[in-house]
Image (cartoon, rainbow, N blue to C red):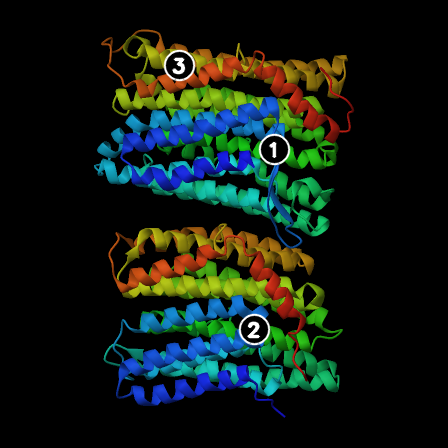
Amino acid sequence: MMLLYFLILPLLAAVLAPLLKPKAATHLTVSFFLLPFFAILSCLFYGCAEVHLMTFSAPIGELYLSADFISHAFGLTICIVSAMVGLFALPYMEHRFVEMELSVESEFRKYIFLYDLYAASMLWLVYSGNLILLYIFLEIALITAFLLIYFYGYGNRRWVGQLYLIWSLVAGVLTLAGFLIIGINNDTLALKYIETVGRYAWPFIFVGMVIELPVLGPHVWLPWAHAEAPTPLSALLSPLTVGLAGYVLLRIALIDYSFIVTYRSYIFGYALFSSIYAGFSVFKQTDFKRLLAYSTVSQMGYILAALCLGPFGLVGVVIQYMSHAFGKSILFSSAGGIIAVHHGLRDVRQMGGLHDSIPAISNAAVVGFLNLGGILTVGMLGEFFILRGVVETFGVSTGSLAILLAVIFMFILSVWYGFYTIRKVFYGKPKDTTRKEISRYLYVPLFLIGITSVLLVFPPLSTALIPGLKSVIWPLMGMGGIVP
Amino acid sequence: MIEFSMPVLMLLGALVILTLCSAFSVKYRDLGFYGAIAALILASAAVTLLIPALIYYTAFVFAIGILNLVSLKVIKSVIQGVDYGLVALMALVTLYIFTTHNLALILAAFVLVSVPTYILVMVREGGTNVEVGIKYITFMVLATVLFLIGAVTLAYTKNAFNGLLYILGYVMLILGLSIEVGVAPLHEWVPDVFTSADPIPMSIIASLAKIVPFVIALRILISTSNSLTVSVTLFTAVLAAISMFTGNIGALTSKEHARILAYSTVANMGYLLACAVVIIKPEFFYFALTGALLMLFANAVGKIGFFNAIKGEGAFSLTMYLLAFSFIGLPPLIGFWGKLFILFSLVKAEYFWLVALMVLNSAISIPYYLRLARELGVGWKANLTNFICVAVVIITLITFLPDWFFRSMEVIAQAISIAI
């Protein structure tokens, strides 16, 4: 029950925060996301029980909050990122409202309601123990994100908002069709009672979630949406929302892995190609936020690849989600910092030497790219599990060596474009050497996210999290005992 | 022999109150309004006493009826107060529709819901809209005749089976229903009437008047189904698919708000007609019934909100967006649950291609609903239009998890067939 009370707090924040002034509302939001964060941390060590909500007639079945380590890992990430980005958003959104010539106080109410509801619905999504509940929260997140783009985005924001809404909705309804077939076949949609997914439902869910993820091909909407959204939204959209498609695929894969086994080589090949192609596309981008969006497509390729790699790969999916979320939220926020300080500067060609004027944001961005590259952060563990998955799945032979090298190249590519971008944006010949005064809100939260990411590599967090994930995934994948 | 128990007396009492108040309302307009409300309350209580499982259905119809009555306050019509009586009559018939198993009464109900709209469609501020009326009545009479003959033919084949006659009856019934509610390609009258009539009467015709024809058609079809049904439902499925596409594409390419709503009706009626194919799997029919009713309510409250916004030249933008999202079918709003249960029932009936088309159509309907919400949305003002819009939004939100409705429909579906 404790879990339920803590999860209700973010929803409560959506109702209460609009009643307060911007600063108080922000602090309320942050504390109402941090409290569940610490509650989930305690769950990692002491465990918590799942919560029964209500029983629906068949074929919907029981609605409950699942409380396993997979949900905790995702929930932890969502809480900390939402809280920190919420903090960062205070000066940023005030700046944006002034820029749009709107009344700060009244617009902030509207904004904070949508922001809190958006983040809270993602949190509830990963704890939903029923596919229909999961779908409801997926769509609430979609509506709120759409409205945020529609009201406060940049450029042609209405068009971009609709583009995002239509693509995500198509993804959503395809997934829903898959869920319905599962519901009819199993007479329940409660995750713990579903026994088969079946060959009809899997393709629907897979295609839907691959659009949502997205990989190369159906990714057309992502650079637009992520680049033109108001930056605090980009800093949740890219790190948290898209990866939730990976969460859905993971949950379905844990019930029935046969689809992945049947098409493993195709999916894996596509994921690698998508990741590497998108990785190279990063070099071509001139808009900083679009550049980050392409990096998201590349990173989502990791998740899809990891999904194909058996139990170790599935642990990799979870950790890769966390590492990408930490890294990308820092990076989008630093892009937002540049926009706020340098009056809407987004063109990479006009940047260079920004370290001189905004050293704090520049240092934060380095931490962000370290996350993406998997250096000294939780991303390291993710890459370890993905590589272990490659070896376990494809064995050790000359043929598998090529696959291993391709995966390693994919990892290197992230580091490569990361340092390329850092050099281009923050170092090199400075165009403006004057040191800017910037609000603490714009960089302190980013370092806090970075610290969380580093702490997760070390005991006691990693020693609680990783065996916990294995204890969920191993039995479902037909492997006995807990492998150290 | 009818037994005059308490609820039956109350049902009749409601009709008496309504008749008397309508008769006097020509002189005292307000009497018509209060009489209509009293009749609705009495009738709702009676229906709930008679069949307790109908309580949720009754509550929805009651709310929709009251909203329709209240929205009529906006215009001062020439038929002073009688318009309240007409709307309340439609609401009463809609309330009573599940309480009888008699074919004659059911067909009478069809006519009773249809006829008041002939007059209502002509209502407008300080005059009558005869041109629209003629066009509308011509189509409605055709629809009624087709529907009644179809229904009677179907009933005949139930006792003396004749394959050819069954198909003829089935097709006539479906065509009659299609014209009545506006399913493409028989939707000729819909865009014209929706755009040229006054928005308030249209909000009634597009909401309350759609419920009874569908319920009756479903009840007749399920009562008369036989071995031929599996093959003839394909006809219905094709019509449904055509209607979804015609409606959505029409709405996408329309500019006028009322015309968008007209095509949105055509699309929604397509979704609803899809429910009729589930009669081939009577054991899962309650899915279709739940879906159809929730969809009808979603359509009704959405249309009431949007038409009132057109009349009031805009309404509070949050309510407009929520109604648009309900139409698009986003959870947890009522429109989502309607579509969900229809999709469930179609999967059970193994009409997978129709499922795919319906899903596709939900997606292509997004842009025009958003456009509607954006163009009709304005800031908050305390007026009747906004009050109505807030009320309809509350209705779209109370079905957050409609298990209660689903369970009550499971009970209702047990005793839905008509004694023939």
Quarter of the view holding residue A210:
top right
Amino acid bearing label 2: Val
Question: Where's the N terminus of chain A, which quadrant?
Answer: top right
**Label 1 vs label 2, nearer the camera:** 1
Q: In this view, does A114 lie above or below A334?
A: below
Question: Along the horizontal axis of the image, is B352 left or right of B248?
Answer: right
**How far is mark 1 from mark 3, CA to CA?**
33 Å
Q: Identify the residue shown where x is 45% and y is 57%.
A: B396
Which residue, given by chain and number where applicable, does mark 2 sit on? B215
Q: Identify the element where label 2 is drawn.
A: helix
**How far is mark 1 from mark 2, CA to CA?**
43 Å
Which residue, given by chain and number where applicable, does mark 3 sit on? A364
Amino acid bearing label 1: Ala
Q: In this view, does A325 lie above or below A171?
A: above
**How far is mark 3 from mark 2, CA to CA?**
62 Å
Amino acid bearing label 3: Ala
Which residue, given by chain and number where applicable, does mark 1 sit on? A67
Question: Where's the C terminus of chain A, which quadrant?
Answer: top right
Let me know if marks 1 and 3 both belong to one chain: yes
